[in-house]
Amino acid sequence: MNLKERYTKPTPKFFKILRNIGIALTAAGGAILAAPVSIPATIITAATYMTVAGTVASVVSQAVVKDGDDDEPKDFDNPALIK
């Protein structure tokens, strides 16, 4: 599977939520970094880490794809098949 196929396949629900949280972190960190006021160095450092963490979470979450056979029942899901 190449990169283009991976990014066009559907993403599981959990990772969609994680991706959206990552986007929000990136936006909040970027807004703090771009603020035209004087901000203490600790807040700038925290905003930088927020921006990096949000970017990584978004990219990794988008790269996760659903497996094609998730909807098929497994043998261990049916108690009648267990001997």
Image (cartoon, rainbow, N blue to C red):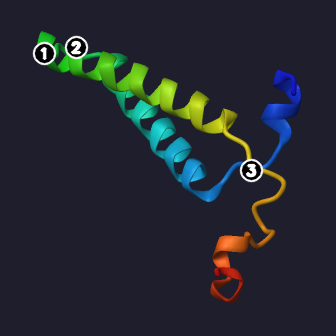
Question: In the displayed structure, does residue 67 sit left or right of residue 36?
Answer: right
**Residue bearing the label numbered 3:** 66
Of the image marks 3 and 2, the number of the one nearer the N terminus: 2
Residue drawn at 23 percent across, 15 percent down: 44
Could you tell me the amino acid type at mark 2? Thr
Question: Where residue 5 appears, x then y in whole percent?
Answer: 88, 32
Eyeballing the image, is 26 above or below 9?
A: above
From this viewpoint, which residue is outermost toward the front? 83
Q: Is residue 30 left or right of 9 when viewed as pictured?
A: left
Q: Nearer the viewer, residue 11 or 81?
A: 81
Q: Quadrant of residue 74?
A: bottom right
Label placed on residue 45: 2
SS state under label 2? helix
Neighbour class for label 3 at 10 Å: few (<14), some, many (≥20)? few
Circle 1 residue: 42
Where residue 68 appears, x then y in whole percent?
84, 53
Q: Position of residue 56 (x, y in %)?
A: 50, 24
2 and 1 marks in contact (CB < 8 Å): yes
